[in-house]
Image (cartoon, grey):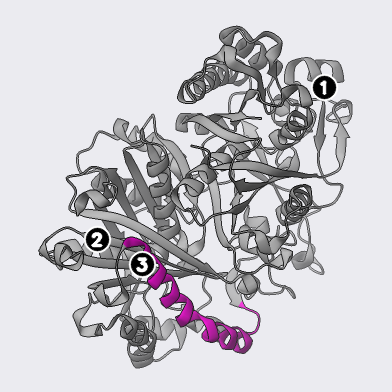
Amino acid sequence: MTSYHIAGIGTAAAERVPGGAVGEAHVDAGELLAAVGLEARHAPERDISPFELAVDASRDALAAADVGPPDVDMILHLGRMRVEYFTWGLSLAVAKELGHLTPRCVDVSEFTGPSLVAGLRLLRAKFRADERLSTALLVFPHRFSDFADTDVPEDRWLWPLSDGAGALVLRRGSGPGAPLGSAFASDGTAARSIGLRSEVVDEGPDPDGFFNHEWALAKYYFLRDPEAWPLEFEVRVATRLADTIERAAARAGLGLDDLAVVQTGYLYPGVAERLRQHLGLGSRLAAHNAQGMMGGAELAFALQTLMADPALRGTRVALAGFGLPGHFGALIAAL
Amino acid sequence: MSTKWPPIGIAGIAAELADMRWDSEEFARFSNIPADVLESRLGFREVFRWGDGRGHIETGVHCASRALAGLDPREVDLICTIAHPYHPEREIYGYAAVLQDALGAEKAELLDVADTCASVTLGLQMVRDLMLSEPEIRNVLVVGIVTTFDNLDLSNPRTTWMANLSDGAGAMLVRRDPHLDNFLLETAQLVDAQFIDDVAFASPYMDEPISYRTRFRRFLPAHVDVADKASFKERLDEVTMSSYIGAARESLERSGFGLDQVDYVGTNRMKPSAWRELLDAFGLKPEEQIKFHAGHVGPLDQFLFLQSLREERRLPKGGVAVLATPGVGFHWTVTTVAFKGPRLEALRG
């Protein structure tokens, strides 16, 4: 049963920082690329809000689909909430900014799988459950680059964290991007492996200007066991991701040989190699590391390329990936 | 009749108020709002907040265990938390991950629906949609904890309308099972995004409120505030009741009922005058409805309502209840729940 197709894809990103310029005082660029896979990351020079990223990507997707905001029946936003950019619902903020005040709006701040894949799965259910839903806007910003401390080499595995957003316009009916099957898994115990620390990042209290400091407090992710984590995570991701890809293909009534491409989001090179071997995919496994880690939003950049490739028209592809600390997902789509 | 609806319903419910209670007299001393105004105009006699006795994280886990009612946690397919419950490392992983780990629900997928008080209805709708779309999903835990009390400045006259906020925890097991005594039916949602900027977080010493447009990274405490209360109230009053009733009508009609067939309305705690006006639309009277004396526990009011509906055996012959809640920003949402029995059979003709 076809529920929707992808009518337009939009993307947005903060300023690009080449991989060689990230933490260069601490880790050799070649080693960083080989071990972590960091080709580039996106981080703002000053600031950019998830809202700005979401709106830019949404406008881009609507233009690509040739759809006006009044045609949107529903906005679904996926993205972990940050108190620094608090909102009652980013979907509502996007609706207001687009000048369309009354679409149904839903915000999802925790989800299993990469954001693009999780969003496609949730909207598949929405399209199936509500025959009135004709056009939906799926938007998934990611704004966590500042949570990576590029002065701590032990945490270099987190340096790919990037700021960007993807947005998709989905329309009822058959067409490219129709979902065929999906599978997901979360490992709650993985949450124990990454911590959060806070630091004062300016000169400290200044009686004359203390309350106006813009950057008084910073938060950083850190690996609780930086020695053991890379290998443990590599095995965990490769195993769980392989399982979700196989289950998604089975639910679509397909085998792995039926897939033209298994397109993932960001993958550490070690994970990619294990996954390639485990599934026997060879060159059909494509990781997208060019934009860094965007919690699944980087898949929107990859999907733009896939859908523009005439050689892939009419094929089936898997979209898959992981989200920190332990979320995995895969969705099979017909292009 | 029963086969018309998908066999998805509520199989377990557990809700608790926070451990520290303030009665209206004590609350009046903190807020400078007279106790009789609290009771007669705002409609609550007590509020609850988290004290030192119990942690909200643990209470949520406890409620989830109770809602499972003996079901092996490994049988849970999905954990859906609502309203992005607070915990110290929420920027890394959500409360759903905490629950998965604590309960041993190792195969559960995770989800959080974060649309303020409307999270309960929109969460139930998302869960039901997924269960309809994916037959392999059988058991879903919906869990919420509320910790909003500390975000209120009781001395702020612009937020008096929110003064009744209470804290608590609740959990619900939604299950695919034809033997359940109820059906979780359609949810309707009406939205007006013009209000997204009206209610914001603000801090002393800050000229501008905290906004999703700009970054807030300071040490100051943040409290809910309203930029222009008069304008906000005027615009909201114009649309709120009609939107509420419009959502109820849509939810009921899509479920196969009319407004006049509803037996119980489980809504957010609201001032008595608004409560009477809302019930009028259903042809119901306040004295026939379940009474609550506690303040508004965010999206958990509906959990407490469903728990009372069961404990007080309000629908021994079946019937129809609606869960109705707005959400700041603004949403108006309604979910219909039908309880099996001769009355439901009669309603369905």
**Is B246 in the magenta?**
yes
> Contact, CB < 8 Å: mark 3 with mark 2?
no
Report the side of A130 relative to B230 (left or right).
Answer: left
* Mark whose residue sits in front, 3 or 2: 3
The C terminus of chain B lies in which quarter of the figure? bottom left
**Is B211 in the magenta?**
no
Residue B53 visible to an observer of this rendering: no
- The numbered disc on residue A27 is 1
> Contact, CB < 8 Å: mark 1 with mark 3?
no
The N terminus of chain B lies in which quarter of the figure? bottom left
Vertical order, B14 against B270 (above or below) = above
* Residue where numbered disc 2 is placed: B338
- The one nearer the camera, B190 or B96, is B190
- The one nearer the camera, B246 or B44, is B246
How far apart, in angstroms, are the residues tagged by discs 3 and 2?
Answer: 13 Å
Task: Categorize mark 1 by other alpha carbons within 10 Å: few (<14), some (14-19), many (20+).
Answer: some
Q: Secondary structure at mark 1?
A: loop
Where in the figure is residue B40, as x and y percent of width and height? 33, 91
Vertical order, A45 against A333 (above or below) = below
Read off the chain for label 1.
Answer: A
The disc labelled 1 sits on which kind of residue?
A: Val
In the picture, residue A39 is in which quadrant? top right
The disc labelled 2 sits on which kind of residue?
A: Ala
The disc labelled 3 sits on which kind of residue?
A: Glu
* Residue where numbered disc 3 is placed: B253
Where in the figure is residue B318, as x and y percent of width and height? 15, 63
- The one nearer the camera, B217 or B175, is B175
> Contact, CB < 8 Å: mark 2 with mark 1?
no
What span is colored magenta in the figure? B226-255
Q: Secondary structure at mark 2?
A: strand
